[in-house]
Image: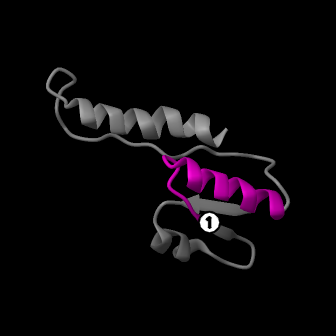
């Protein structure tokens, strides 16, 4: 099993002999490429659980900033595509 997260300290909490870990920001092409290469050398991928995502800001849709929406779209949509 391979667990992937952006924050190394969170991965350290679950690392074990049965769980390999890999630090990766799924919004960065180069890091996802490195993850792919690592996964291929360790047996490939049978199942992917795309769990990255989140909301930015507490403003209404009308008042929300374009940058917040870009950030959310990058993580919630583009990163899912990148991982697949």
Q: Is residue 64 above or below residue 51?
A: above
Q: Residue furthest front?
A: 30
Residue at the image position 81 percent from the left and 48 percent from the top? 46
Q: Residue furthest right?
A: 43
Q: Which residues are magenta?
A: 23-42
Magenta-drawn stretch contains 38: yes
Q: Is residue 48 above or below residue 37?
A: above
Magenta-drawn stretch contains 16: no
Colour theme: one colour
Residue situated in front as seen by the camera: 61 or 66: 66
Q: Is residue 33 left or right of residue 47?
A: left
Q: Quadrant of the C terminus?
A: top right
Residue at the image position 64 percent from the left and 45 percent from the top? 49
Considering the whole magenta stretch, tell me its main secondary structure: helix
Q: Is residue 55 above or below residue 61?
A: below
- Determine which quarter of the picture holds residue 24: bottom right
Q: Is residue 11 above or below residue 82?
A: below
Residue situated in front as seen by the camera: 5 or 24: 24
Q: Residue furthest left?
A: 63
Residue at the image position 69 percent from the left and 70 percent from the top? 20
Q: Quadrant of the N terminus?
A: bottom right
- Determine which quarter of the picture holds residue 61: top left
Q: Residues within 10 Å of mark 1 (few under 14, many from 20)?
A: many
Instruction: Look at mark 1 in the image and give the residue it sits on.
Output: 22
Q: Position of residue 69 (x, y in %)?
A: 30, 31
Residue at the image position 16 percent from the left and 33 percent from the top? 59
Q: Position of residue 66 (x, y in %)?
A: 24, 29
Q: Position of residue 64 (x, y in %)?
A: 19, 29
Q: Residue furthest bottom?
A: 17
Q: Is residue 7 left or right of residue 62?
A: right
């Amino acid at each position: 099993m391979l667990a992937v997260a952006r924050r190394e300290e969170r991965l350290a909490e679950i690392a074990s002999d049965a769980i390999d870990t890999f630090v990766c920001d799924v919004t960065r092409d180069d890091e996802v490429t490195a993850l792919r290469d690592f996964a291929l050398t360790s047996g490939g991928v049978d199942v992917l659980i795309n769990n990255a995502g989140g909301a930015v800001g507490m403003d209404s849709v009308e008042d929300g900033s374009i940058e917040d929406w870009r950030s959310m779209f990058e993580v919630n949509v583009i990163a899912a595509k990148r991982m697949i």
